[in-house]
Amino acid sequence: MQQFEHIYSSPIGRIKIVADYNCIQALTFIEDKATLSSTEGIESPPVIHQCIDELIDYFNGNRTQFKVPIHQSGTDFQQKVWRELYEVPYAKTMSYAELAKKLGDPKVIRAAANANGKNKIAIIVPCHRIIGSDSNLTGYAWGLAKKKWLLQHEFRIGHGVQTLFA
């Protein structure tokens, strides 16, 4: 199936959106010098336009849940982790240990963290909402500064809090 790419300039950097005709397959932060692949100039399918509209709403503080259809390939375990991530409420955080417990086995913390790190649909599958058990920011594929920004944005909108982390 044909894939389409679009680069969206967000308040915290450029985001590459990859989709087919039916769903978003990846949403990743990219370096400013990155360019589109050979789909440049081809009309994007409606799902990309829906994704961009929802991202604009999110960054403007008007969206707490995404409705755009998504799909990313992964193992059964990764899919299970990503489903749990998708359920973490806006402006809330969960520790890796809590995530492992929700998966049904407190011993799978490292495996859950690994699957979290393999998430290719940033923001929509909110892997940024997973933090360390000590409430510290830990790992984020696109950098801790972006993770901190996303969490502070959500807390500011969701709770009227100006900062979450010093």
Image: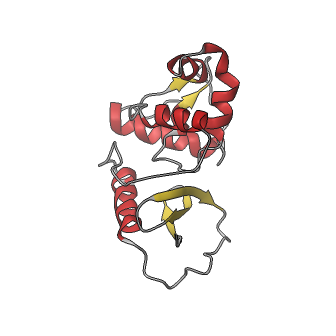
At which x and y percent is residue 59?
A: 40, 52
- Asked where in the image residue 127 lies, by quadrant, the reply is top right
Q: Can you say whether 75 is above or below 96 in the image?
A: below
- Determine if residue 19 is in view: yes
- Residue at 58% from the left image edge and 27% from the top image edge: 131
At which x and y percent is residue 85?
A: 49, 34
At which x and y percent is residue 73?
A: 58, 50
Quadrant including the C terminus: top right
At which x and y percent is residue 11?
A: 48, 57
Q: Nearer the viewer, residue 77 or 93?
A: 77
- Asked where in the image residue 51 lies, by quadrant, the reply is bottom left
- Asked where in the image residue 95 lies, by quadrant, the reply is top right
Q: Can you say whether 74 is above or below 5 in the image?
A: above
Q: Nearer the viewer, residue 8 or 165?
A: 8
- Residue at 44% from the left image edge and 37% from the top image edge: 86
Residue at the left extreme, as displayed: 62
- Residue at 42% from the left image edge and 68% from the top image edge: 21
User: In this figure, what is the number of numbered marks?
Assistant: 0
Q: Can you say whether 70 is above or below 19 in the image?
A: above
According to the image, what is the colour scheme of the structure?
secondary structure
- Residue at 53% from the left image edge and 64% from the top image edge: 18
For residue 71, side relative to residue 64 (left or right): right
Q: Nearer the viewer, residue 79 or 49?
A: 79
- Determine if residue 166 is in view: no
Q: Which of 144 and 127 is in front in this view?
A: 127
